[in-house]
Structures are given as C-alpha cells and as structure tokens.
Image: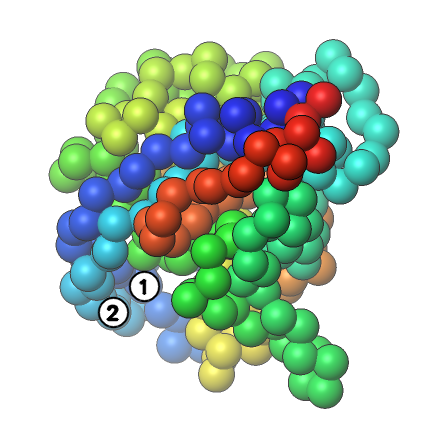
Amino acid sequence: MNLIEYIKENMILIPQGNEIIRDFVDPVKWLSSDYKMSAPGTNKEKIMKQKLVEVQSFLLFKIPVTNELYNYVMEMDYDITTKNCPVVNVSWIDAVNFCNNLSEKLALEKCYILDSVSEKIIVDNAKNGFKLPTDAQWQYACRGRATGYRYGNIEEIAWFEQNSEKRVHEVKTREKNDFGLFDMIGNVWEWCFDLYDEERYGNYRIFRGGSFASEERACGATSRRKSFPEFRIDDLGFRIAKNNLEGIKLNRSEERRVGK
C-alpha cells in the first residue's frame, strides 16, 4: 500500500456551514451501554435540547476506515478477503490510537495526548494530524447539503437490517452523498470524538449513523448512540478527519518510508 496516496485519494474537503444539533434527553439518569438516543419514534417524555453549531471547513475520509488500512497502520494480520470492508470490533480508544499512529507514519503532529495522571485523552486541535470527527462535524458531513433525515433513498444509500443479510459489506457499494462520502448511513456505526454528557453519563462517547444490523428508523443523519470508550461490537467502526490547515504534505523520503 502506498499510504500517502491512499489517504490523499480518499480525503474529501467538507465546506464550512451550520448545523442544528438536537438531542432528546431522558430526565432519568441511565448508564446502560445499550441505551438508544435520538432515533425517530423514541422521544416520548424526553426533553429536547438543540443548538446551532458553526462547522469550519475540514477534511473527512470518504469511507469508513477499512480492514486493509487499519491493519496496515497498526501492523496487524487480517483476512485479506475482507480488506475493503469497514474495520469493526474497534473501541473508541482503538480509534484514537489509530489516528495517532497514522499521523506518526505520515510525519504529522499527533492530535491526541494521554494524560497519565487523570487517564483522560485530550485533543489538541492546533495539530495537523488525524482525529475522529466531532459530533457536529459528522452530522453536517452526513447530510451533504440535504435537509432531511437521510441524503437519499435508504435502499440506495445504506446497508441496514432489511437488505444487508445481517453482515457488513464492502465500502462504496451504496450511493454517496453530495459531498462525495460513502456509507455515512448504515453498514457500520461510527465513533465520534465527543463525550455525550459527562455530568449525566460519565465517559460515554457518541457513535453515529446506524449499521447493517440496525432497523430502518435508526439509520439517519441525526441518529446516535453512546457507550463507554472501551466498548467493541461487530457493527461499530469509525472514519478519520483532519483540520483543513495545509493539506497532507510529505517529502519524498517520507513517501518512500510509508509506501510499499
């Protein structure tokens, strides 16, 4: 794999814009990792919160991170027959470590810093390396200029419970959105960087978009769930983002080092 060329080919520039982020909060505190939020039809007796967020231009991977890319960067063996499928069974911690490893391989600055005293991970948004998209970035990018719950007909844009045969599928086998992003809805849920609500739910992180195992109503731009950062399951993956600073730059010696 020529890593730098692969990354360049799959990064999409997302333009600046605004996004309304809504959430429906259960007044009863609940810490179950299986708790569902913001899925249509599940908002009875919940409190709606919303805010308008300005999203600055940024770079986003057009596909979820695949088995091929993940295992190349993490230097792990894998089943080559699944190389074009999204990597799954990865925790939020795994995704953060992948971002730092990829940044290091491409001679970019790591965005994540581990605070060994508090055992918390801090993000440095001034760095030029890779990171997970924020909750607002993910939702804004998912819409891709659409205004509804989805950017197209679900049968055409997503692998979900009714058409997936209960398995993950290769990326780019459904239609893309207007920004050129594939699999934002369905196929695999995707980790975001954000804590859901630290005061109410501790260190639980957000994941988005629905999966091959999800019912139709759970597959949409505003659908989200949450779990603890070590959580892993076979329909949860991630995609990578990057600040739109100076693009992806490597000198020739670095290209030779990371390419095969």
Residue placed most toward the observer, 216 or 106: 106
Q: Quadrant of the C terminus?
A: top right
Lateral position of residue 55 relative to residue 217, left or right = left
Residue placed most toward the observer, 246 or 131: 246
Residue 202, horizontal then vertical, whole percent: 57, 77
Point out which mark residue 49 bears. 2
Q: Amino acid at mark 1?
A: Phe
Rendered residue at 27%/41% (across/down): 14
**Cα separation between marks 1 and 2:** 6 Å
Quadrant in the picture for residue 238 = top right
Circle 1/circle 2 CB separation < 8 Å: yes
Rendered residue at 52%/20% (across/down): 171
Lateral position of residue 218 relative to residue 7, left or right = left
Q: Amino acid at mark 2?
A: Lys
For label 2, the SS is: strand
Compare marks 1 and 2 and give the one earlier in the sequence: 1
Residue placed most toward the observer, 197 or 239: 239
Question: Height in image: 233 above or below 171?
Answer: below
Question: Height in image: 13 above or below 121?
Answer: above
Question: Height in image: 91 above or below 154?
Answer: below
Residue 97, horizontal then vertical, whole percent: 68, 54
For label 1, the SS is: strand
Can you identify the residue that label 1 sits on?
Answer: 24
